[in-house]
Amino acid sequence: MVDEGELRRRWEKTVEMLSREGVIKTEPVRHAFLKYPRYLFVEKRYWSYAHVDEPLPIPAGQTISAPHMVAIMLELAELKPGMNVLEIGTGSGWNAALIAELVKADVYTVERIPELVEFARRNLEKAGVENVHVFLGDGTKGFPPKAPYDRIIVTAGAPKIPEPLVEQLKPGGRLIIPVGSYHLWQDLYVVEKKGDGRIRKRRWGGVAFVPLIGEHGWKE
């Protein structure tokens, strides 16, 4: 087992690489990555691989995204302190921890798999993150109790943009979501709600995510 000091050094090199390549563009995102390294959010047997820029397995047959993909989505979201943010697909809890560091406010995240709800809660507690609230449920329905949101970030691929998520955006809000096929490639979209309610969609590029399961997503 690699000691935590070595894990930290490896992770810092990954963050330096992502910054050098222009994937991490802003200091707040860089700071969040350094504060919450990915190895804190995977099982110990994967610690030695946490710095590698690739997805890794987490329980229930799911994955934790590659560091570069997480950075890209956070930069596209343009998160600012005080924003009200909803995440769909908690997974390991890592992305929610990063969001919470960026907005300095409560973050709400919805996960459909009970095992991952508990996994994420344990990881967040061990990492000392106190302002992330993990809920079990169908993320394609959003989370109405805390709506509307400045930002919604979806970490699974949808067949189409779920209408409840658009409805729960504030005017001026932004939704980051992969849309496309079930197990192959999707396109990452930035969806903006204008002040008059009009929707503007911008395609960033190709990505590959696990499927978004639910009433307004893929069916099990």
Image: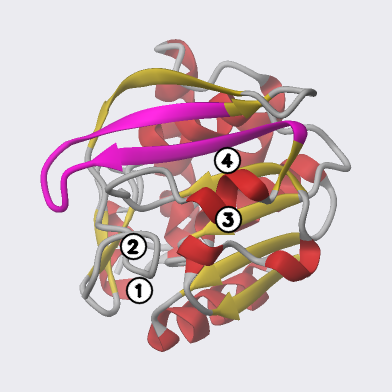
Tag 3 residue? 87
Residue 129 visible in the picture: no
Q: How much space separates mark 4 and mark 1, taking CA atoms? A: 18 Å
View extreme (left): residue: 184
| Label 2 Cα crowd, 10 Å radius (few <14 / some 14-19 / many 20+) | some
5 or 46, nearer to the observer: 46
User: Hey, what amino acid is under mark 1?
Assistant: Glu
Q: Is residue 110 positioned above or below 72 on the image?
A: below
Q: Earlier in the sequence, mark 4 or mark 1?
A: 4
Residue drawn at x 32%, y 43% as measured from the top left: 66
Q: Quadrant of the C terminus?
A: bottom left
Tag 1 residue? 43
Q: Is residue 58 toward the left or the right of residue 126 in the image?
A: left
Residue 3 occupies which quadrant of the picture? bottom left
Mark 1 and mark 3 residues within 8 Å of each other at the beta carbon: no
Residue 6 visible in the picture: yes
Tag 2 residue? 47
Determine whether the residue tagged by mark 1 lies in a helix, strand or loop.
loop
Tell me where residue 82 appears, x and y as whole percent: 88, 42
User: Hey, what amino acid is under mark 2?
Assistant: Trp
Q: Earlier in the sequence, mark 3 or mark 2?
A: 2
User: Hey, what amino acid is under mark 3?
Assistant: Glu
Tag 4 residue? 33
